[in-house]
Image: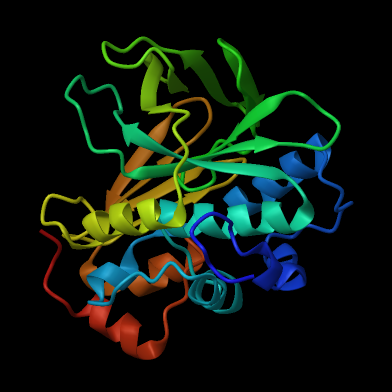
Amino acid sequence: MADDGYGWNGGELDLDAYLARIGFGGDRAPTLETLRALQRGHTTSIPFENLEIILGRSIPLDLKALQDKLVQNRRGGYCYEHTLLFAAALERLGFGVTALSARVTMGAAAIRPATHAVLRVTTAGDDRVWLCDVGFGAGPHAPIEFTDGAEILEDGWRFRLERGTGELNTDLWVLHQAGPEGWLDRHTFTLNPQYTLDYVVGSHYVSTSPRSPFTTRPYAQRFTAEALHVLDGTTWTTTRPDGTAETREVEQSELPRLLDEVFDVALDPADAAKLAHSDPPV
């Protein structure tokens, strides 16, 4: 199917390769059980990373480029890449998929741009609606039902979805995550549908603006049942479900090995050398 901006090109996806990438071998019917298994497999198998930007390359969002990078070359990506690939897989399997844009808040009161991608998903034979957030890099492992106050607890990681209030829009939703100091609002969003071209515009800002956190330093996340690993520049933080965390500083030259061994991001020799010997992150 040609990319007309309204669908997700699921017919062009190498579904078998994608499902092998995320370790999924279950039933392919568009049920809630399948959706849960797909989200868990995706979030724990494909890491979050911005290394193409740091290596001086653009971020194409066509499905072929996404498959080549995230599936065939076993790299990671940021939210737009993850979400578009996941949307293609869901569409191919028969789920109902609507794209949404979110504003990452992390407790901040100031208005931030809507630069995070999430999905509204429906399953076969079920009137319920689900939030799937596979592109944040820090979970959740499972979809969350679109009901005010819905909570999930997966492997000790806890999330809550609430209907918020906004001066200009009453159809506001807030995703919270639990931390050592209680609930933290992670991002807000409305149900206004987004399309491929909206994500292309957002991705251009995120990958090129000097105000974007992803244009100044390497950033990667690996989320598992046991731990969330975050690399921010040369700072490596490991957080566990109970909130305990440890932080280490690493040398620039150590980044390729750390990315490979901890984040499951294997760079080719030329890119590894460039990252290891580039100027320290700002």
Left/right of residue 93 with respect to residue 281 in the rendered view: right
Tell me if residue 144 comes above or below residue 7 in the rendering: above
Among the 4 quarters of the image, the one containing residue 207:
bottom left
Residue 250 percent location from the top left of the image: 26, 60
The correct choice, above or below, for 193 with respect to 252 in the image is above
Point out the image quarter for the N terminus.
bottom right
Residue 132 location (% of width, % of height)? 58, 38
Position of 180 relative to 262 (above/below): above
Tell me how many marks there are: 0
- The residue at the point 46 percent across, 60 percent down is 81
- Name the residue located 50 percent from the left edge and 74 percent from the top edge: 69
Q: Residue at x 80, y 44 (%)?
A: 34
Q: Is residue 230 left or right of residue 23?
A: left
Compared to residue 20, the image places residue 148 above or below, namely above
Residue at 31 percent of width and 13 percent of height: 166
| Coordinates of residue 7 in the picture (x, y in percent) | 58, 56
Question: In the drawing, does residue 137 fall left or right of residue 141?
Answer: left
214 or 280, nearer to the observer: 214
Residue 86: image location, x then y, percent? 60, 54
Q: Is residue 233 visible?
A: no
Question: Furthest residue to the front?
Answer: 4
